[in-house]
Image (tube, helix red, strand yellow):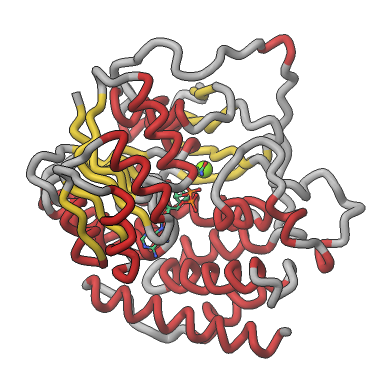
Amino acid sequence: MRNLSLLGATGSIGRSTLDLVRRYPEEVRVVGLTAHQQVAALAAVVTEFRPAVAAIADPALLPELMERVGATATELVAGPAGLEQVATLPECDTVLAAIVGGAGLAPTLAAARAGKDVALANKEALVMAGDLFLAEMAAGGGRLIPVDSEHSAVYQCLQGCRAEDVRRIILTASGGPFHGHPEIDLTTVTRAQALAHPNWSMGEKISIDSATLMNKGLEVIEARHLFISDGAEATIEVVVHPESIVHSIVELRDGQMLAQLGRPDMRGPIAYALTGPRRVAGVTERLDLTATPLHFTAPDLDRFPCLRLGFAALAAGGPLPCVLNGANETAVAAFLANRLPFTAIPAVIETAMAACTCPPPATLDEILALDSWARARASEAVAKMR
Ligand code: NAD
Ligand code: MG
């Protein structure tokens, strides 16, 4: 039985997680919940799951949360300190980090430091703060378990493998809504077109990242931190697999490949993160392989330069992954607000990366300062590109 604090309970991953809690009450008990501004949705799940503590990130909404929840044994808190309280509750052993973007970094690091097992969906936190994050996990003594479907696939494939036998990690990418449509002019695609992911139903930010392939750019950096220790020779590659059935592949020293397959349903990797290596029955619908031909092609880095930027930030290391992430968040927000064309997203990120002469950040304060710097450079670039 996991005693779970769920950061980002009202999002796509949060809702899938709570669906599993409803279906497998003997496996998971909710002890903490958080949300940003979705006060009605948070109040509803506080009433349903009765956690010890619930936090609303926007402090102005705490009175409304209290009013909506009414008489309750749940302690209702707010702001960054409230998120941290939920992430470090004594009655919690596992934190599922499902806040989107850099906003999730501080509470997720707090969970790591407090020795919680961290089930990580919030890949941006690891991209921004990889070394610090892993150091805090090691100091706290908890386990870091991937929730991102590709990384869950690699993690599952690696069970029983020796790290030194891994030669190549191949992350699959759906390609997003524009892969295989060379007739679509990317300079004029709309918000609605970019949000219409062919296989996965997800939050807005990651949906745009999937359309630009930045999601895979972030994921190659995430995979490096999760699976490849310093000095190891294994490489990370990306193949486009439009069906999203093979979630990723590990190639071993002897030339053999291991893959994990399943429907594109995040409840698969979330359930494995919470119960693995045990499996619980009937998490996702079964797959008919005869009904699903599988295809694999190389990604088009010229049409989707964000993936090239992800590989560049991975190779350069130092401050660049954090700058890549912060500038991407700013560019995606501007695109979603109809203030930036789709094809200008990589240009904004590249401008911020090229301007960076900063030293690698070591502490949380330095990481947050670098993140703010990257967002400011990206905002300037957005203003110039409109
Ligand atoms: P979402 O937008 O649907 O939900 C985000 C959650 O974070 C919400 O609960 C929201 O209230 C909270 N939040 C947002 N801004 C916040 C802030 N400033 N402070 C505190 N809380 C805040 O996002 P999602 O699609 O569920 O994605 C969550 C994370 O999981 C992302 O890092 C994403 O990359 C990753 N992920 C998602 C999927 C998916 O299928 N949705 C798959 C793999 C990885
Ligand atoms: Mg993924």
Q: Is residue 251 left or right of 319 when viewed as pictured?
A: right
- 183 or 316, which is in the foreground? 183
- 262 or 239, which is in the foreground? 262
Report which quarter residue 274 is drawn in: top left
Query: Would residue 112 be visible to someone looking at this image?
Result: no
- 136 or 227, which is in the foreground? 136
| Residue 339 vertical placement versus 186 (above, below) | below
Q: Position of residue 135 (x, y in %)?
A: 19, 56
Residue located at (22% from left, 44% from top): 32
Q: Residue furthest left?
A: 90
- The quadrant in which the C terminus is found is bottom right
Residue located at (58% from left, 89% from top): 380
Query: Would residue 212 be visible to someone looking at this image?
Result: yes
Q: Is residue 263 left or right of 361 when viewed as pictured?
A: right
- The quadrant in which the N terminus is found is top left
Q: Is residue 369 left or right of 291 when viewed as pictured?
A: left
- 337 or 297, which is in the foreground? 337
Q: Position of residue 223 (x, y in %)?
A: 42, 46
| Residue 27 vertical placement versus 340 (above, below) | above
Residue located at (14% from left, 54% from top): 113
| Residue 343 vertical placement versus 73 (above, below) | below
Q: Is residue 281 left or right of 183 when viewed as pictured?
A: left
Q: Position of residue 253 (x, y in %)?
A: 44, 29
Q: Residue furthest right?
A: 183
Residue located at (49% from left, 33% from top): 266
